[in-house]
């Protein structure tokens, strides 16, 4: 049984990107805390697996196969919730290209999914919460890329930086309604999205990132899910417009 401040019994959470990785771990943990969880993703099989995990632990899960760039479909899914207490906008993709190699289609694709998809989720969640008078929590997914430079990070980093600005701006705009908006900025996390497919290359990358971290390891999806849970529940009732950085200590900005 979770501590009272982390008890989400009777509340409803909506998680995008819930078919795998951080989204799946977040959906499962929110359900463990007592929330009814609506899981959204393009991957039908992954959604089914996530829902099965939640139900197997005695939780309640609903699935919505959708693309977060489809505003109308996302709106319908959010509105299908009897009430909405938590939105975790996790869905995103990885992309790497140098500044000189970046094409219009690269930038458009990453911004559409990693920024517009988050924007649409935030807008629909905020509208639903305001209309119902729910003093809810919106959690966005930024990245440690907003604190560090590096080759190939233009599209991905720009989209995540936009998510940070969205988070801070929305927090100021809907705070008077009692709705909190915060972001999680993970470090290197071992997920299907960061899987290099080449075993040796993957091991080399993870070993390098682990050496950079004072804690001496890369992160797991469950590490980030814990941050999402904290920002979703009453334990962070006086926290809004903030960026929580579970990154193993790789970046320590003021």
Image (cartoon, helix red, strand yellow):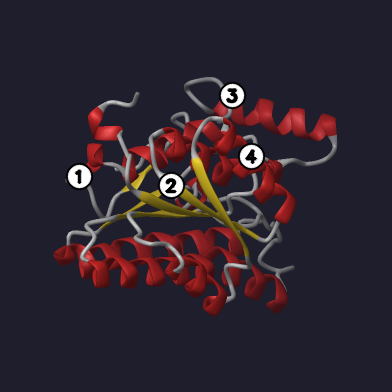
Is residue 218 visible in the rendered structure shown here?
yes
Badge 3 element: helix
Give how far apart the Cα atoms at labels 4 and 3 are.
36 Å
Give how far apart the Cα atoms at labels 3 and 1 are.
35 Å
Q: Is residue 239 above or below residue 100?
A: above
Quickly name the residue at label 4.
52
Image quarter for residue 125?
bottom left
Position in image of residue 206 (x %, y %): 67, 30
Q: Reading the chain from its start, which is encountered first: label 1 or label 2?
A: 2
Quickly name the residue at label 2.
36
Task: Name the mark nearer the viewer: 1 or 4.
Answer: 4
Quickly name the residue at label 1.
237
Q: Reading the chain from its start, which is encountered first: label 1 or label 4?
A: 4
Give how far apart the Cα atoms at labels 4 and 2 are.
14 Å
Which residue is at the front of the view, 229 or 224?
229
Position in image of residue 39 (x %, y %): 55, 53
Circle 3 crowding by C-alpha within 10 Å: few under 14, some 14–19, many from 20? some
Image quarter for residue 165?
bottom left
Badge 2 element: strand
Circle 1 crowding by C-alpha within 10 Å: few under 14, some 14–19, many from 20? some
Give how far apart the Cα atoms at labels 1 and 4 are.
31 Å
Residue drawn at point x = 62 percent, y = 42 percent: 50
Badge 4 element: helix
**Quadrant of the drawing holding the C terminus:** top left
Residue drawn at point x = 39 percent, y = 43 percent: 35
Please indicate whether residue 23 sits to the left or right of residue 94 in the image.
left
Please indicate whether residue 72 sits to the left or right of residue 172 in the image.
right
């Amino acid at each position: 049984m979770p501590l009272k401040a982390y008890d989400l019994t009777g509340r409803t959470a909506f998680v995008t990107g819930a078919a795998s990785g951080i989204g799946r771990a977040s959906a499962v943990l929110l359900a463990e805390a007592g929330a009814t969880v609506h899981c959204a993703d393009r991957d039908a099989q992954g959604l089914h697996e996530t829902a099965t995990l939640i139900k197997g632990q005695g939780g309640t899960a609903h699935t919505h196969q959708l693309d977060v760039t489809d505003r109308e479909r996302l709106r319908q899914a959010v509105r299908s919730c009897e009430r909405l207490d938590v939105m975790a906008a996790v869905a995103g993709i990885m992309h790497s290209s140098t500044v000189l190699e970046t094409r219009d289609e690269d930038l458009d694709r990453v911004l559409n999914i990693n920024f517009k998809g988050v924007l649409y989720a935030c807008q629909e969640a905020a509208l639903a919460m305001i209309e119902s008078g729910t003093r809810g929590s919106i959690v966005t997914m930024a990245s440690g890329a907003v604190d560090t430079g590096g080759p190939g990070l233009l599209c991905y980093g720009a989209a995540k930086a936009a998510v940070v600005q969205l988070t801070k701006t929305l927090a100021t705009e809907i705070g008077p309604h009692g709705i909190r908006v915060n972001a999680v900025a993970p470090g290197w996390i071992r997920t299907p999205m960061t899987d290099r497919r080449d075993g040796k290359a993957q091991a080399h990358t993870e070993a390098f990132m682990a050496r950079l971290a004072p804690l001496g390891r890369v992160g797991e999806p469950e590490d980030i899910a814990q941050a999402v849970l904290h920002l979703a529940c009453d334990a962070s009732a006086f926290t809004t417009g903030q960026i929580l950085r579970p990154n193993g200590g790789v970046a320590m900005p003021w």
